[in-house]
Amino acid sequence: MADPGAPAGRDGPLTWGQQDIWRAVLAAAPQERYLNIARVFAAPKRPVTVERAALALERLVARHESLRTRLTGSREAPLQRVWPSASPPYEVVEAGPVEPGPVGSVAVGSVAVGSVAVGSVAVEAGPVGAALAEEVGERLAAEPFAYWEEWPLRVAFVVAGGYVRHIVLVLCHLAADGHAAELVVKDFRLLLLRDSLPLLRSATPRELAAWQHSPEGRRVSGEAIGFWLEEYARMDPVPASAYVPGEPRFVEATMRSPALAAAVQEVAARNRVSSSTVLLAGAMRLAGRLTGQRFCGMRVIVNNRFAAGRRDVVSTISQEALVVLDLRTESFDALVRQAWGTALRAYRQAQYDPYAMEEAVTRVGPGIRSFGCFNDQRLVQEDGQVAALEGKTEVARTDAMDRNICDFRLHVGGEPGRMEVSCYADTALLPPPGIEQYLLDLEGLIVEAART
């Protein structure tokens, strides 16, 4: 790819959140495509031409410097370089007409980059372009980014009848965390309707990275490390893995549950906590049953956008907090209330130098470690009374890989009324049937709590 011109200022360090992601990239390589973030959304109802969508993309990239950033320097210690302008390529995918036919019939969409056709895509019949857009998103997310040469954003416009029907965005995780991805989607939608947006008042990624490497940033990091070490001192040892690892080594299962969505809201409202807290308490209760711990620790992803100056930052600034619970409580409601207060304290200690943190916690002692990671990626948790939708619980294996990103991870997503929870685990820790059962046990635990 041709050099786009001179960079905007000198090269700078990665943010702490970006450093965390880079460590995950190195751990997962060459399968780090699993870290890519894909978003697919419908275009506004007003007609949107490809030209208007391309102009919105240009303004989006001009607005957020993380979308104009590439890595520079060595692979062992990369820096980031911001460019004054960037023009990420985009695909135009023509959704073919959907002909009436039997279930499973397909329509064919042609794919173009600029004005050059490069292939065709088959898509199941359905709403205009929706299934095709999902398929394009999976294809664009299927390859790792070229971090030194490629812009950290891949784009496609799915077109039917001369107008853009869906937009596909795939973001490099070094440019955006989950919350930032939603901010990018929001801005893109607004830019498709307007010619401009209000000026950003949040700190830029380079400004945040500079603060993190300042004396004040190092002080904040040191306080967080001290807090984690105090919490580690409370934890019971985690026993060694009990199973022979399978092939592939790491397996993910996903549960879609209308019943869980309603039960979580019921327990949250009764205890005046967030639905995320209820899920965290349930996840840690079940983790303690696996490990036999009384004091169990789990890492929780925190988006670190509490301060006004960071609310709209598009970058990777999220990091992990450490939540340690005493699992010997008289009731699940008591555990939920304990989790609420403990998590709020932990969230304040989720900004730190990841390399300094790793060095500190590896010296704690054998067997003393946290159990897995909890990530509720719902941007809006829709807390409140939610009636369960019709439908039964579905559990299916959704992914597998032979490289380790995390020994155990619980991911929460889905739509209001139909919660989606994924469990990814090392098969030496939990074999595939146990992964699926963990999800069903989580549903059963919270549904039962909602009834009592």
Image (cartoon, rainbow, N blue to C red):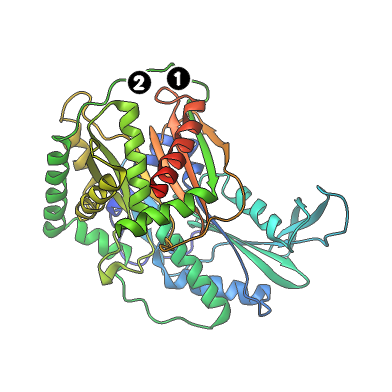
Image-based side of 350 in relation to 120, left or right: left
Question: Which quarter of the image is occupied by the N terminus?
Answer: bottom right
Q: Residue at x 29, y 55 (%)?
A: 15
Q: Quadrant of residue 210?
A: bottom left
Question: Along the line of sight, which residue is nearer the eye, 106 or 56?
Answer: 106
Query: From what the image shows, is residue 114 above or below residue 252?
Result: below
Amino acid type at circle 1 is: Pro
Locate residue 228, reporting x and y percent: 17, 43
Q: 331 above or below 263? A: above
For mark 1, give the secondary structure. Answer: loop
What residue appears at the point 47 percent right and 66 percent down from the top-left corner?
Answer: 184
Pick out the residue farthest to the front: 452
Q: Quadrant of residue 82?
A: bottom left
* Cα distance between the residues tagged 1 and 2: 9 Å
- The number of discs equals 2
Residue placed at 55% from the left, 74% from the top? Answer: 56
Q: Are marks 1 and 2 in contact (CB under 8 Å)?
A: yes
Callout 2: SS:
loop
Q: Is residue 244 above or below residue 420?
A: above
Identify the disc placed on residue 317: none
Crowding at label 1, few (<14), some or many (≥20) Cα neighbours within 10 Å? some
Residue occupying image coordinates x 65% and y 75%:
51
Is residue 75 visible in the rendered structure shown here?
no
Label 2, residues with CA under 10 Å away: few <14, some 14-19, many ≥20: few
* Mark carried by residue 241: 2
Q: In this orientation, does residue 151 appear?
A: yes
Left or right: 102, with 30 as reference point: right
Residue 366 sits in which quadrant?
top left
Return the residue nearer the eye: 300 or 282.
282
Lateral position of residue 110 relative to residue 425, left or right: right
Q: Which residue is mark 1?
A: 245
